[in-house]
Amino acid sequence: MITDRLIEGIIDMQNPTCVGLDTLFDYLPDDMKSGVNTFEGVAERVFEFNKKIIDNIYDIVPSVKVQIAYYEMYGVAGMKAYEETLKYAAEKGLVVIADAKRNDIGSTAACYAKTFLGETAVNDKTLRAFPADYVTINGYLGTDGVAPFVEECEKHDKGVFVLVKTSNPSGAEIQNMVLENGVPMYEYMGGLVEKWGESTVGKYGYSAVGAVVGATHPTEAARLRQVLPHTFFLIPGYGAQGGNAEMLKSCFGANGLGGVVNNSRGILCAYKKNGGTYYEAARTASVAMQKDLSSVIGVMRR
Amino acid sequence: MITDRLIEGIIDMQNPTCVGLDTLFDYLPDDMKSGVNTFEGVAERVFEFNKKIIDNIYDIVPSVKVQIAYYEMYGVAGMKAYEETLKYAAEKGLVVIADAKRNDIGSTAACYAKTFLGETAVNDKTLRAFPADYVTINGYLGTDGVAPFVEECEKHDKGVFVLVKTSNPSGAEIQNMVLENGVPMYEYMGGLVEKWGESTVGKYGYSAVGAVVGATHPTEAARLRQVLPHTFFLIPGYGAQGGNAEMLKSCFGANGLGGVVNNSRGILCAYKKNGGTYYEAARTASVAMQKDLSSVIGVMRR
């Protein structure tokens, strides 16, 4: 079961983190960028960069989150680099999260679910488009926009993370609006997520339907941890966005489980701040992040 | 100004509609599907199908909406067909809506905005990834997730449609939840959309920041039309989803302006019901839809 597998990676590495491969071309060292002036050129270099990052973290970090926006902006060639990155990370044994925040009505959501979690039928063949272990989704369309994803999760042992309380400042404009029954929208959305996950709870007590809960909102996170006992959190906002270990502690239960913390720029661009090669700096930054989180979160042992 | 251009197309053709190129491979006639067993094969046939549809409707329909999920599910090759379809439709003078429902925090939303509405920088060059006139977006992340799109709209004369009241049955689970001030979420979201569009109102009184309002919810649509005077509506749900002309009338103002009604399966799959070639059937169905809407909506003349 996918969330069990993610949790066991976290336990074995004592590291509840995820490296965000939000690889903007500008993040690459100058010598890798030099002379490139086509999307094909960008795609080739970005994949080369990602491979080196993955090679240097896969034994100490259990998962990667690959933000599709940073590939789609380089057109069809960028999407090829996206596909290659997902596949390479999976080959290295990482749990792969496609960060795509997909959402639509049922019939269209079914296509997205097949794209990232399932298979696409072409006459009598089935093929995989952009294969991942999890995909992030937006729940604004309610149950019938989410159900096709849950179906693919059940069928192919995959998972989703639904946006609940996002890390950005103005998420509160919608998510913290209080409903007439006194419950804020993020908590109401969280309740739906807990329900959507009911059929897929694994042996550690967490389901395949997780929630995105920003590291930047400790009060909301504490409340969500309390009311969503079976929901695993994907926690963005650590580092560049201002979240720190102390702030996100409330996302975790007493056994140190309950979430995985993403860091993108802090890993990919560590070399710009600390020097050295980008991949050695990424590994050093990953080790430092593990230590930082360990100082406040005691992940259980098997 | 993009919404003026869309409105003038609607006026000139007396036709407030949009053909949805949600081209599932299964929608193609058997002889076009025969022998295909790769994503590359699908992509080639889907683009061929789209071209013929466009060739047969571009003089009577002002816009197309191209649903990205139906391309992404065919992998990198599918994304190539998506790009080609957007470009071909633009060449034929159609207003092109990329239906992608993108959403993320500001820095990532900026990438999506460049992908569909603006340009991507590669060293000293700028290139376009998936060029469209409008892109659909989801507002769950609030203003800082929308602002980068509005910026590209201002810079490149483009537009967005933000999900407000979607056509699917369970959208109500979130969108009809009533806030403590008595306002339902869809109306509150609509209010944000009206505000986000303030800087881009064109000569017909509508801004570049539109709203998605389903044809299947006449009561909510009437309320939104009343409280969002400068917001143009993209109206899905006509036909296969159960919406009809009478139900969506309330989306339009007294001058017959205010929205564009999408029809996907009812056009693309018309040949399955009515016989003939798929492209002739698509044209016949487009003419019938225009007549059906004209019976209740009187679009103003120049």
Image: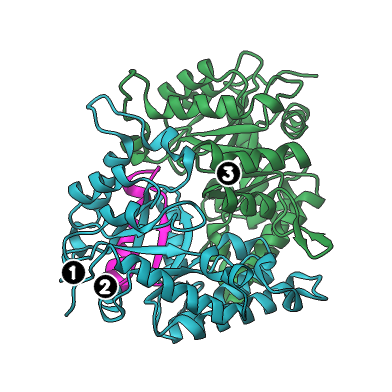
Chain colours: A green, B cyan
| In this rendering, the label closer to the viewer, 3 or 2 | 2
Q: Residue at x 26, y 72 (%)?
A: B7
Mark 1 and mark 3: Cα distance apart in space: 36 Å
Whether B154 is among the magenta residues is: yes
Q: Which residues are drawn in magenta?
A: B131-159
- Of A141 and A50, the residue lying toward us: A141
Chain containing the residue with disc 2? B
Q: Is residue B59 above or below residue A62?
A: below
Instruction: Return the disc, 1 or 2, that comes first in the chain's sequence.
Output: 2
The answer to whether tags 1 and 2 share a subunit is yes
Q: Residue at x 63, y 56 (%)?
A: A278
> Which amino acid, mark 1?
Gly
| In this rendering, the label closer to the viewer, 1 or 2 | 2
- Of B207 and A78, the residue lying toward us: B207
Mark 3 and mark 2: Cα distance apart in space: 35 Å
> Which amino acid, mark 3?
Thr
